[in-house]
Image (cartoon, grey):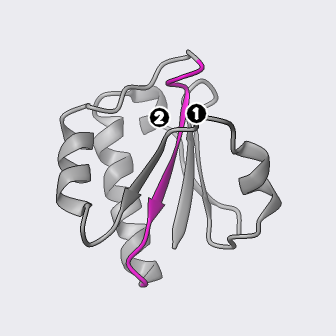
Amino acid sequence: MLKAYLNYPNPRVTTHRNPSCGEVRKMAKQNQRSVLINTQTISTQLQAFAAKQYKFSPTAKQNDMWIRVDFGDPVFEDAILAYVHRLIGKHYSRLASASIERHC
């Protein structure tokens, strides 16, 4: 599974594959927004991102998000995240310019 952390005020997208990564625990917070994209949710979630149903702003509730991509195929998971990143970037230029960085 790929876990990606998106931060809006400080534009960045950081990916994690190690489930015990200390950075994942450090960036987790109570009531954290988290989206799961897998075989059951892919269509619904891609439509939601394309329709700007997930908002980003510098407020505590909308300033970041975890996206979990789970297909058991790292190459496909990276491609899905790249596509979601492009969809978000169509509406949020700050995130569009953020590169996807691999942490672990």
Report the label total: 2
Is 67 magenta? The answer is yes
Instruction: Report the disc number at residue 65.
Output: none
Which residue is located at x 24 percent, y 62 percent? 42
Is 64 magenta? The answer is yes
Residue named by callout 2: 95
Pinpoint residue 77: horizontal percent, then vertical percent. Answer: 41, 72
Which residue is located at x 50 percent, y 39 percent? 33
Query: For the residue carrying disc 1, how many other residues have a C-alpha within 10 Å: few (<14), some (14-19), or many (20+)?
Result: some
Q: Are marks 2 and 1 in contact (CB under 8 Å)?
A: yes
Who is closer to the viewer here, 101 or 49? 49
Segment tinted magenta in the rendering:
60-72
Q: Secondary structure at mark 2?
A: helix
Which residue is located at x 53 percent, y 23 percent? 61
Question: Residue 31 sits in which quadrant?
Answer: top right
Q: Residue furthest bottom?
A: 73
- Left or right relative to 22: residue 67: left
Residue named by callout 1: 11
